[in-house]
Amino acid sequence: MKCNAAIALLPWFLNDTLAAEEKVAVRDHLKGCAACRQELEDTYHAWRIFDAHPRPEDLIALAGEPDTVEPERRPLLERHLEQCARCRDEVQLIRESRQHFLGSEGAATTTAPVVGAMDSSMVPANDNRPGPGWRLAAAAAMILTLVTASGWWVSYQQRRSLHGELVALEAALRDAETGRLTEASARQHLEAERQAVAERAKELESQRVHAPANALQPQLNLPVVDIYPEDMVLRGGSGPKEETIQRPTVGEGIVFILGSQSAAQGPFALEVLEGSRVAWRGEGLRRQERGEFTVTLPAAILPGGPLTFQILDSSGKVVERYRVRLVP
Amino acid sequence: MRGSDKELIQNFLAGDGKAVTEVDRWVHQAAASYRRRLGGDWEDTLQDVHLELTRLLRTGAFRGDSSLKTYLWRVVSHACLDRIRATARRRFDPVEEVEQTGMLSLPPSQGKRHEQQDLLLRVLAECSDECQELWRLLFAGLSYREMSQKLDVAEGTLRVRVLRCRRRALQVRGELESDET
């Protein structure tokens, strides 16, 4: 392998996605070429640059106690947040944690706004991916259908409202436990609140898992992703890898188009699994015009990491599986 | 330091059941918002937090500048974010090999981690959105073929763009390091 060819492949050598023969060729070339080993070192240093993020303590300070952030460093951190969807997501998570646990306690919380809330870096490359026009039209039609759907009393906003109630009940639980009530009434209050919290948590969990897809609110610029069954072999001989997708940030979602290869007739159900846990289940899944399935999932339902999409027939038998990995 | 915080710390370190239960409850509550993202690492993370918190309280790291609850929240958040990032970061064998061979010449300010991290962030801020997107796809573990299809560019063009981004990033780093010295 010549130097130019080896150098061009170094980033993919580092992310370990080269075909076996290419990897061996690059490795053998590096053994015998000091100049290319220097290029590898440069590629590694560039890797560290592009993978740089503020330390957790910086984000914690920025999210919870912004006055404690050194003034000369703050512009650098805020600029990074403008460019990095992952760190914005983390800041949002930190704020939710602080609000949930500390409430109004703690240091002054003159919270800085999360800058760059809507910028192009949040939109994965998939959104610009040119595909057959009918796929995008099918997704747009589905979104419109979702917006105008009626008859479902459980909506995403209602789930958020329930979540807010849960947070408020837990706060009341803390108040009771810190002894702000008389002992006797505190015990009664505590027991009642524990039961209420447990019931609400069960209700929320049930709705989170069983809420239908068309509980989603209207959204702009949703990314559209094609995924294929795990046992499908693509042209060229290699099976589809686990599809890697950028996880949407809070308040957004993803439109999945499942390129089904099965001839099974519906009706179907769709389950999204995180390991063996059902993160979400939808009933009444139907094939679209060209046999594919579509589902829009909001960020609240999508944990990061590996997920499995399972299509089940009316008897509960798994018809197809799709593997997806959500990355920040 | 508040009297109630001091008493709780003393009792906790002495292994008093009520104090340990109270602190554990706080840890669970503080970590609750991170639970979904932690997934299967939840229990391990709580265990790590408990050990780290015990260590910090035992060494007197908590000086009472804030309430104990606020301090605990910071410790929990730090640990949860570290775990979330570690899980999300796909460690690639060649990267680990490169790091472990000792052949790398590290930048001069390697000894000062904060300054080094800020330098990297400053360099990154100077890199174009396109370059940052290309490398994000690399970190996500996409092959050059997958990136080429996703971005709808020829593979050769893609490799040239990534190489240009790499060179530009290192050039900027060199310039910023020169400015500092």
Image (cartoon, helix red, strand yellow):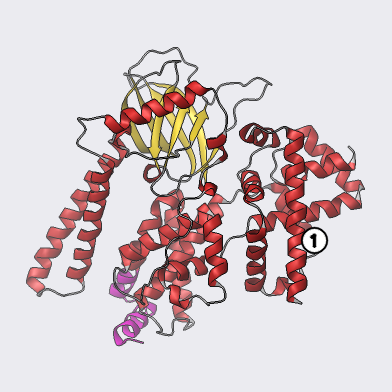
Query: Is B83 on the left-hand or right-hand side of B138?
Result: left
For label 1, the residue is B104
Is A266 above or below relative to B162? above
Is B132 above or below relative to A110? above
Label 1 secondary element: loop
Q: Give the range drawn in magenta.
A: B1-23
Predominant SS of the magenta segment: helix
Foreground residue among A91 and B181: B181
Is B44 above or below relative to A265? below
Q: How many marks?
A: 1
Quadrant containing the N terminus of chain A in the rendered view: top right
Q: Is residue A53 magenta?
A: no
Res. A276 visible in picture: no
| Callout 1 amino acid | Leu
Foreground residue among A166 and A51: A51
Give the quarter of the image for residue B26: bottom left
Residue shown at the point (49%, 82%) measured from the top left: B59
Is B156 above or below relative to A182? above
Q: Position of residue B70 (x, y in %)?
A: 37, 74
Q: Where is residue B45 in the image (x, y as percent from the top left)?
A: 46, 59
Give the quarter of the image for residue A67: bottom left
Neighbour tally class for label 1: few under 14, some 14-19, many 20 plus, Cα within 10 Å: some
Residue shown at the point (46%, 34%) measured from the top left: A308
Res. A91 visible in picture: yes
Q: Is residue B17 magenta?
A: yes
Q: Position of residue A28 (x, y in %)?
A: 86, 42
Q: Which chain carries label 1?
A: B
Residue shown at the point (67%, 75%) measured from the top left: B112
Foreground residue among A118 and A101: A118
Give the quarter of the image for residue A272: top left
Foreground residue among A31 and B137: B137
Q: Where is residue A313 in the image (x, y as percent from the top left)?
A: 36, 19
